Amino acid sequence: MGVVERVMFFIALAVLCVASTAEVYMVGDDHGWNINSLAYYKEWYASKAFKIGDSIVFEYAPERHNVVQVTYENYNKCNASSPIKTFNSGKDTIPIKANGHYFYICGIPNHCGMGQKVNIRVVSRDSPVTPTPPSGITVPSSSTPAPPPSTAVTFSKDLIGTFGFVVLAAVAAVA
Ligand SMILES: *[C@@H]1O[C@H](CO)[C@@H](O)[C@H](O)[C@H]1NC(C)=O
């Protein structure tokens, strides 16, 4: 490899090392946000590794469904009467901005009970795992100050960067 190629290779490798792709997840995949069985949605959300920077998209006929973000308790009870947030455009894109556990149900009577509900658990690989309360217990958010995530992210990126450099050094030595 010539000098230019090595430099290009290093840049490409460095980009690969720091870039983490933001995913856009269509809730329910091909079936969208509809009355599908609870098992269907469970399988859908259990198979995803949601992280900060990703988005989830609810796509549905707005005259038939909506999206209501609720507490864990109201998620279990399918109670949409005190929403944290309500969406009703028919195509709602919700960016994931923080670690946590997010609960969405359809607010149209009976739809949640028929299985139209998802829970989105976000645990970033770059940040320390935030303990989630055991089922049924709600911890007031004020009592748990969020840890500063920036140090963890920087540390982890440094590690990856170092790793990338070691890989590069090895390749360069061979080339
Ligand atoms: C629904 O939730 C609200 C607020 O949390 C509560 O006041 C109401 O009693 C609940 N309704 C049912 C049927 O549980």
Image (cartoon, rainbow, N blue to C red):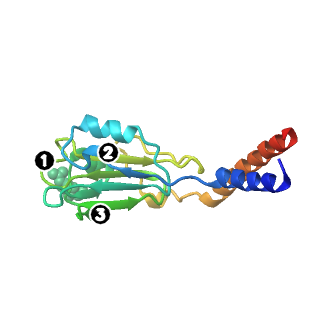
For the residues labelled 2 and 1, the Cα–Cα distance comes to: 22 Å
Q: Which residue is mark 3?
A: 85
Q: Quadrant of residue 146?
A: bottom right
Q: Amino acid at mark 2?
A: Asp
Spatial distance from mark 3 to mark 2, Cα to Cα?
Answer: 22 Å
**Dot placed on the residue nearer the N-terminal end, 1 or 3:** 3
Report whether 105 appears left or right of 149. Answer: left
Q: Nearer the viewer, residue 5 or 131?
A: 5
Residue located beneath label 2 in the image: 29
Q: Which residue is mark 1?
A: 110
Q: What is the crowding at mark 2: few (fewer than 14 residues within 10 Å), some, or many (at least 20)?
A: few
Q: Position of residue 155 (x, y in %)?
A: 70, 53
Of the residues tagged 2 and 1, which is closer to the observer? 2
Q: Is residue 30 above or below residue 59?
A: above
Q: Amino acid at mark 3?
A: Lys
Q: Secondary structure at mark 2?
A: helix
